[in-house]
């Protein structure tokens, strides 16, 4: 059984690249990964209770917002490094789909909304992983960050893909390895979604050829490059 967690970034004029992706956990690494995430949160906050005040949110960590406002940039960058080190040490697989929304909208007369397209593609990537790496009849459950405007349509689309036997892409594939439905929850209720959020934040920050000039930005880029260099990180550009 695999547990698949994804998050996505918000696009803007400054950053038109839409990223959606996250982590894949299984029985071999899920306990160690969770225990380490709990320790990382406890070391930083003095508590590992799942609540808003202990949520690891990539944007807030880097920019010192909310509960991170009074914490030093050095400690906040170390927090990124601790989470990435945990991902690497536990050999947690990462799948990321990146879509240039400007180019996508320019190419097609009736372009697919980037969230819907990205969700379709990341589900395909998750199923590809299970098919290649899992045992016979391996399956998975998918969890996403709560997005009020997207939940109903996402669940409907997923159920439609399963009903018709494949995704509607030109080279679409069955999603039979994913069972039941897509489960959405608030990210402060899931350490695994928080890890996915931090990955997607770094992808959004450095996926548009952002050239850092400040030392903390350069340090975060090193952490991101360290993560990308692992064998279990695969980025898909449709």
Image: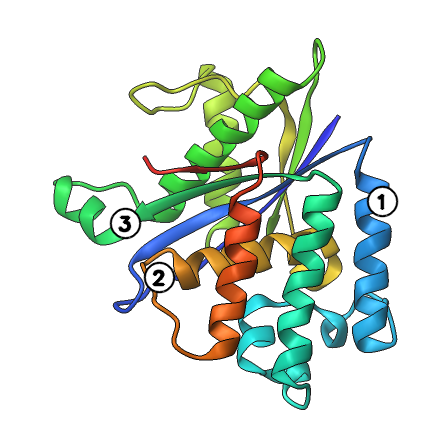
**Which structural element holds mark 1?**
helix
Question: Is residue 159 at all visible to an observer of this figure?
Answer: yes
Checking the image for residue 32, the label placed there is 1
Quadrant assignment for the N terminus: top right
Checking the image for residue 3, the label placed there is none
* Disc 2: CA contacts within 10 A as few (<14), some (14-19) or many (>=20): some
Checking the image for residue 100, the label placed there is 3
**Circle nearer the viewer, 1 or 3:** 1
Q: CA distance from mark 1 to mark 3?
A: 35 Å
Quick check: 212 left or right of 125? left
Question: Is residue 146 at all visible to an observer of this figure?
Answer: no
Q: Residue at x 56, y 59 (%)?
A: 223
In this rendering, the answer to whether 198 lies above or below 161 is below
Examine the image and state in which quarter residue 39 appears. Answer: bottom right
Residue 212: percent from left, percent from top: 39, 71
**Looking at the image, is mark 1 or mark 3 earlier in the sequence?**
1
Q: Residue at x 36, y 39 (%)?
A: 117
Q: CA distance from mark 2 to mark 1?
A: 33 Å
**Frontmost residue, 210 versus 200:** 210
Q: CA distance from mark 2 to mark 3?
A: 9 Å
**Frontmost residue, 212 versus 96:** 212
Q: Residue reaching furthest bottom?
A: 70
Quick check: 106 left or right of 68? left
**Which structural element holds mark 2?**
loop
The residue indicated by pointer 2 is: 11
* Disc 3: CA contacts within 10 A as few (<14), some (14-19) or many (>=20): some
């Amino acid at each position: 059984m695999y547990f698949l967690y994804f998050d996505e970034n918000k696009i803007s004029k400054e950053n038109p690249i839409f990223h959606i992706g996250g982590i894949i956990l299984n029985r071999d690494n899920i306990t160690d990964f969770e225990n380490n995430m709990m320790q990382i949160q406890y070391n930083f906050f003095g508590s590992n209770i799942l609540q808003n005040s202990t949520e690891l949110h990539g944007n807030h960590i880097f920019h010192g917002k909310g509960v991170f406002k009074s914490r030093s940039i050095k400690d906040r960058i170390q927090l990124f490094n601790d989470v990435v080190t945990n991902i690497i040490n536990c050999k947690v697989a990462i799948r990321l789909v990146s879509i240039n929304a400007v180019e996508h909208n320019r190419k097609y007369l009736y372009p697919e909304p980037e969230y819907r397209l990205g969700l379709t593609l990341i589900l395909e990537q998750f199923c590809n992983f299970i098919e290649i790496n899992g045992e016979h009849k391996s399956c998975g459950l998918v969890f996403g960050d709560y997005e009020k405007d997207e939940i109903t349509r996402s669940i409907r689309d997923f159920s439609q893909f399963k009903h018709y036997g494949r995704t509607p892409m030109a080279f679409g594939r069955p999603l039979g390895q994913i069972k039941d439905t897509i489960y959405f929850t608030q990210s402060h209720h899931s350490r695994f979604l928080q890890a996915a959020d931090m990955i997607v934040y770094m992808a959004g920050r450095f996926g548009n050829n952002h050239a850092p000039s400040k030392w903390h930005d350069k340090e975060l880029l090193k952490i991101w490059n360290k993560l990308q260099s692992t064998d279990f990180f695969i980025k898909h550009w449709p």
